[in-house]
Image (tube, grey):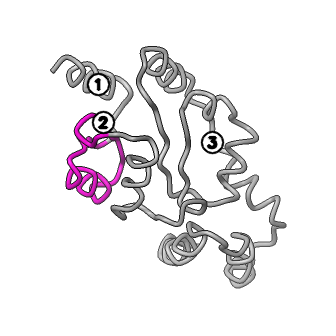
Amino acid sequence: MTKNLFLPALKEIMAVVRKPNAPAAFSLWKPYLDKWGVVLTGQEFFNFWFSGEHLVPELVEYAQQLRDRGAKVFILSNNFKERTEFYRKNFPLIFQSVDKAYFSWETGFVKPSIESLQLVLTENHLKPEDCIYFDDSDDNIDVAQSLGIHAEKWASLELAKAMVLKLSQE
């Protein structure tokens, strides 16, 4: 299988499973897997897909340090139900180190929608100008900046720490 076959399927399926009340992700993958001659159960499929996932202890530790200093820390993710459940089961420290995690399949708002960010701001009584947001998508950063949030492209934990320190001293 080539990425020319896989990537369009991934894009199509992710557009569906990132929303509330989506069908089980494997039910959408199964026809493609059958067509490609890949024989896996749903559990085998997700075990393979998620096998490369791992906790980043330094990031979890930094999130906790920020919270210990009085900052609020949130996750805003377009991850789908099965992957979220995998994270909650296998990496509970992630969720213990943040104030709240927002997943599009639970909220109904898929980034880069303005509503996804507005939900976090409103629910937590936050002013956009008091927030720092990191993302790996230029579109998501542009939307955050349009709301007055200081948004930066994620490059590394070291650069994020430097930006947080710089902004907290202004």
Residue 140 on the magenta span:
yes
Q: CA distance from mark 2 to mark 1?
A: 7 Å
Q: Secondary structure at mark 2?
A: strand
Dot 3 or dot 1: first in sequence order is 3
Q: Residue at x 28, y 60 (%)?
A: 139
Q: Label 2 amino acid? A: Ile
Is 55 left, or right, of 144 in this rendering? Answer: right
Q: Is residue 151 above or below residue 104?
A: above
| Quadrant placement of the C terminus | top left
Is 118 left, or right, of 17 in this rendering? Answer: left
Q: Label 1 amino acid? A: Val
Residue situated in front as seen by the camera: 24 or 45: 24
Q: Which residue is mark 1?
A: 164
Q: Is residue 123 above or below residue 1?
A: above
Q: Is residue 46 above or below residue 56?
A: below
Circles 3 and 2: CB distance less than 8 Å? Answer: no
Q: CA distance from mark 3 to mark 1?
A: 26 Å
Name the spot of residue 55 as percent of width and height, x first.
61, 32
| Quadrant placement of the N terminus | bottom right
Residue 61 on the magenta span:
no
Name the spot of residue 34 as percent of width and height, x first.
75, 81
Q: Which residue is mark 2?
A: 132
Q: Secondary structure at mark 1?
A: helix
Q: Secondary structure at mark 3?
A: loop
Q: Residue at x 21, y 25 (%)?
A: 167
Circles 2 and 1: CB distance less than 8 Å? Answer: yes
- Residue at the limit of the structure toward the left, as seen here: 170
**Boundaries of the magenta span:** 127-153
Dot 2 or dot 1: first in sequence order is 2
Q: Nearer the viewer, mark 3 or mark 2?
A: 2
